[in-house]
Every structure is written in structure tokens, then in C-alpha cells.
Image (spheres, rainbow, N blue to C red):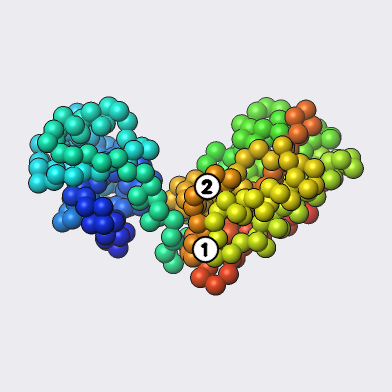
Amino acid sequence: MHDRIERVRAKMRELNLDALVVSSRTNIRYLTGFSGSNGLAVVTHDNAYLITDNRYRDQAPLEAPNAEIFIAVENLYRPLKGQKLLQNCKRTAFEANHLSFRGFSHLRDIAPNNHFIATENLIEKIVAIKSRVEIDKIRAACLATEKTWAAVLPMLRPGMAEVEIVSELYYQGLRNGATAMAFEPIVASGKRSALPHGTATSKSLQPGDFVVIDFGCEVDGLKSDMTRTVFVGEPTADQRQMYEAVKTANALAFSSIRINMKAAELDKIVRDRLTELGFEKEFSHSLGHGFGLGIHEIPRIGQKSKDWLLPNSVFTIEPGVYVPDMGGVRIEDDVLLAEDTPQLLTHIGRELVTID
């Protein structure tokens, strides 16, 4: 954790900042190790502080031994004033994407003479480059995901409800090495599979359905994110064409990855190929995203992204085609961009699987 804080301090010196107030739960965990649901971190050039509430009085010192901890009584910002944590600071930054207006109002009231600077992605750009320990835990999360899929796939059958599949993903995930699930699994079948982020319902799997299953496992906070699409019964020629287009796009995405390429360039390569295959409008989201402690991190791999694909970054490639009133297909894999070459972290087959 000390190395992470020092990387943030180096960025603070570059921007001439005296302090950084961190309100994102993911970034608080990244900097301090604290996993609680309520917290605030403050980094100065000499100290790192963690403020939380009384529920975490015993947990916080165990998870965040490198931070000085304060327990807030009324709100998280009161210790900033009572302990005068910002009194020697003139330029204090905050996370514009995460701090609420109420939180900013508290800061302004506590330190009215401070010049507050809104920052975007200051920590996120640091987080994007993974350490060896982080990569190892992401590999473990991907392995748990593969084992979970291997256990759940044989259970799928016509008549099974989407929510039943979700429950099996949770159960098998925790049985196969996950310390938690990375996010609420997405299971959408039939016409609902055309919803890229469809929430599972009581709908049962029926012959003629595509079934999109998007889930991931978590190991010590580090996540994975994988999607596979299966078919109930025998697909039509159009449905096979749709699936093959996405499979082709997935393979093209991986083979096109280069170190230090623009993320938007990778998105364009895949998007152009799907357009050639007749699915220009049906690919309605970005190609991928980084992940780690958070499920959506830098780099963002989309048409308007300004991010770059850098060594030791980890991200998804997830082309999809969604046709209203027919269904959708998505094939998502996790990629480590090592210092010399991209590596697939998810190895489950991509051939169309049919269930009877």
C-alpha cells in the first residue's frame, strides 16, 4: 500500500497539490486496503488518513495499517475539521467523478481558505497499471470463473429460470475459489438477450433462445469478467451467422491488440469488421474496459476513448450483436497486456454450445 500512496504523491507533486481527498470506495481500497462501505481517505505529502464510522472501529486498523485512522461520529468530514487535517494545505484536490455536492460543501465549510481542485481519473490512471501481485490475483479470479462455468454449463436445460442460473453461478463461484462474485451476474434469454445488461428474471429457457451469461469471480478484491452465449435447441442459419460474426470479432480483437495502441483504434478495427458482416447498428456498446478492484476501470475501449493500451494493463474484449425481437450474442474475454505480448486470461471455448 505504501508504494501505491507514493505513486499518488508523485502525481500530487506534479500537479502542485498539498492534499487529495479520496471518496471512491474502490480507490480508498486501492490506497489503504480498507474494504468497508463507508469511508474517506486523505493523502498529504507526509501522512495518509482513513476516516470511517464506528462499525469499522476494529476492522479498519486490520485492513489499513499504513493509514492513521479516525472514527467519525456524525459525518465523515467532521474529523477533517476537528483534527485539523487540512490546516496546512492550500491546494486540496478531490475526485470530481465521485464526490457528492454535499461532500464538497462540507469540504468548503471545513477549509474555506483552501483552493479546491477538481480532478478526474488521477488515481484511476495509476490503478490501470497492475502490479505482479494484482495480476496474480486477477489470474486466480479468472481461473475461478472458468471452473464456475465448467460446473454450471452442464446444468443448463430448457425450462430453467434465468434466476436459477444466477443462483448456481453464486454457489459454484464460491465453491470454486471465489471470495465473492465480481458483480451481479447478467443472465438474459430469448428476446431479452438483446438487452446488453439485462437483469435476470423468472423467465425460463425455451427452444430457440440465445442465452447471454455475463459474470465474474473475485479473489481478495480483484475481479474477472467473462461472457458466454449459448443456444437452446437448434439455431437457424441467421442465428448461426449472428453468432459466428461475434466470434470472428472476438478473435479479431485479440489478434489486433498492440502495446501502446490507442484504445479507440482497437474498437474501430472490430467495429469495422462487424459492419462488413452486416451488423453495424447492432453493436451498440464499447468493445471493452479495464478492470481490477473495480469492474469498470481505465482503459475504456470505445469509439471516443482517449485512453491507450499500456503494458501491464488488464481489460476485456467483448463484442456483441443485439437484434430487437430476436436476441443477442456477446463473447467476452479478459486480456493481460504483458510487456511483450497480449495474453488471454480466460480460456473457455468460443464455439457455439447448444443445450437440449
How would you rate the neighbour count of disc 2 (Cα within 10 Å): few for under 14, some for 14-19, many for 20 or more?
some
- Image point 55% across, 54% down: which residue? 263
Q: Nearer the viewer, residue 47 or 111?
A: 111
Residue assigned mark 1: 260
Is residue 279 left or right of 257 when viewed as pictured? right
Is residue 344 left or right of 12 when viewed as pictured? right
How would you rate the neighbour count of disc 1 (Cα within 10 Å): few for under 14, some for 14-19, many for 20 or more?
few
Identity, as a three-letter code, of the amino acid under mark 1: Asn
Residue 133, given in percent of the width and then of the height, sits at: 42, 64
- Image point 68% across, 47% down: which residue? 271
Identity, as a three-letter code, of the amino acid under mark 2: Ser
Mark drawn on residue 291: none
Is residue 112 left or right of 260 when viewed as pictured? left
Residue 215, given in percent of the width and then of the height, sits at: 60, 45
Q: Whole-Å distance between the Cαs marked 1 and 2?
A: 14 Å
For the N terminus, the image quarter is: bottom left
Is residue 196 left or right of 19 when viewed as pictured? right
Determine which quarter of the picture holds residue 25.
top left
- Image point 51% across, 70% down: which residue? 339
Residue 183 visible at all:
yes
- Image point 67% across, 54% down: which residue? 269
Residue 252, given in percent of the width and then of the height, sits at: 70, 58
Vertical side of 339 occupied by 192: above or below: above
Q: Which of 224 and 205 is in front in this view?
A: 224
Residue assigned mark 2: 305
Q: Which of 78 and 17 is in front in this view?
A: 17
Q: Are the residues flagged by discs 1 and 2 in contact, CB closer than 8 Å?
A: no
Vertical side of 306 occupied by 196: above or below: above
Mark 2 element type: loop
